[in-house]
């Protein structure tokens, strides 16, 4: 069903729902790309539950894939010692080409982001199997892409993350740059962007969480240095209404003030190309609460405010997602 949907499912069924709904959306821009990339194999210790789509509109062609990472993946090694975490989650990728036997190519012809859902200490044996773990989700899908917010059910893992992932295509942008009109944004509630630029995991490695993919202009983060948990705003996507506020309800006139996230063409906040129509962030304590529905003036669009903590953290993701 194109539009808004919510429920509780495992991540294998979620990527199937996303792929199948995109394929069924209007325009016929999204098609199934590789029949060998399916969710039939969901075995613990494998990464073979996956989907691959082709996007074609006019002269714009690219490939988008989703993989359930169900192996203990080393995601962090500090610069000072050998401590590390293991993670499991969903890896998203854009690619310029596709080879049926091997999938998406190596960078720079692809961009990837592994969104961590389960994170465990490597010295304690890593993460649990995510095969049957249920995730409560809130999602909008249409022909432009999707936005999903999810909260996993409790497991024995010490650092479970709720998450938001947005993939969105825009038909227009401020100037011609030779790049596709698409981006990915993602964030988790414990570590907004957990990344490690050390020699172990740095550079283009596919186990990194990147909050922003902008084919083929840049990815963020993709820098050197040691472990960091950084808020992603102003590194390619910007959305401040005023200093310190993203979205809020005025105590004076009762109106909601917000900014549709501005997508930039470099990892900064000064090269805007288009604005999102699928989501925007909001602040707690200034008039808005979880479950509020915001109707946009001059349009029939409505957005649902969601606030997600996770089983292991009271940190919350506060985003409004397309609802109507």
Image: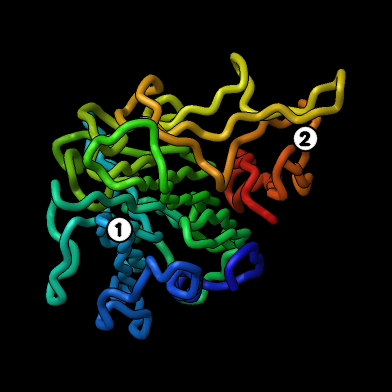
As helix, strand or loop, the secondary structure at mark 1 comes to loop
In percent of width and height, residue 305 lies at 70, 45
Residue toward you, 199 or 218: 218
The quarter holding residue 41 reads: bottom left
The residue identified by callout 2 is 288
* Quadrant in which the N terminus is drawn: bottom right
Q: Farthest top residue?
A: 243
Residue 319 or residue 217, whichever sits in front: 217
Mark 2 neighbour density, 10 Å: few (under 14) some (14–19) many (20 or more): many
Please provide percent x and percent y for residue 282: 65, 33
Residue 223, image x, y percentages: 23, 30
Q: Residue at x 60, y 29 (%)?
A: 259
How far apart marks 2 and 1 lie (CA) works out to 41 Å
Above or below: residue 225 compared with residue 114: above
Badge 2 element: loop
Residue 143 visible in the snapshot: yes
Residue holding disc 1? 58
> If you read the primary sequence from the N terminus, does the residue marked by circle 2 or circle 1 appear first?
1
Front-most of 173 and 276?
173
Q: Nearer the viewer, residue 48 or 304?
A: 304
Task: Indicate whether 259 appears above or below 304.
Answer: above
């Amino acid at each position: 069903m194109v539009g808004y949907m919510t429920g509780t499912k495992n991540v294998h069924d979620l990527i199937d729902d996303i792929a199948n709904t995109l394929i069924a959306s209007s325009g016929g821009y999204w098609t199934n790309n590789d029949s060998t990339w399916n969710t039939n194999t969901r075995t613990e210790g494998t990464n073979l539950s996956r989907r691959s789509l082709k996007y074609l509109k006019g002269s714009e062609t690219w490939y988008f894939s989703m993989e359930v990472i169900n192996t203990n993946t080393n995601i962090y090694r500090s610069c000072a010692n050998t401590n590390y975490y293991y993670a499991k989650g969903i890896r998203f990728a854009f690619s310029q080409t596709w080879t049926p036997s091997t999938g998406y190519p190596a960078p720079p012809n692809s961009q990837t982001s592994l969104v961590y859902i389960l994170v465990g200490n490597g010295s304690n044996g890593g993460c649990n199997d995510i095969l049957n773990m249920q995730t409560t989700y809130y999602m909008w899908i249409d022909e432009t892409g999707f936005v999903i917010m999810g909260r996993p059910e409790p497991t024995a893992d010490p650092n479970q993350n709720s998450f938001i992932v947005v993939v969105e295509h825009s038909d227009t942008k401020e100037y011609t740059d030779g790049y596709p009109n698409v981006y990915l944004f993602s964030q988790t509630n414990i570590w907004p962007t957990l990344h490690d630029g050390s020699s172990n995991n740095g550079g283009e490695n596919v186990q990194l969480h990147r909050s922003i993919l902008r084919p083929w202009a840049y990815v963020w983060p993709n820098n050197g240095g040691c472990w960091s948990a950084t808020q992603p705003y102003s590194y390619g996507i910007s959305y401040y209404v005023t200093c310190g506020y993203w979205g809020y309800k005025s105590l004076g006139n009762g109106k909601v003030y917000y900014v549709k996230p501005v997508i930039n063409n470099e990892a900064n906040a000064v090269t805007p190309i288009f604005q999102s129509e699928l989501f925007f962030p909001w602040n707690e304590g200034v008039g808005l609460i979880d479950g509020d529905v915001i109707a946009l003036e001059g349009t029939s669009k409505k957005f649902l405010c969601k606030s997600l903590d996770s089983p292991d953290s009271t940190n919350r993701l506060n985003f409004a997602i397309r609802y109507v």
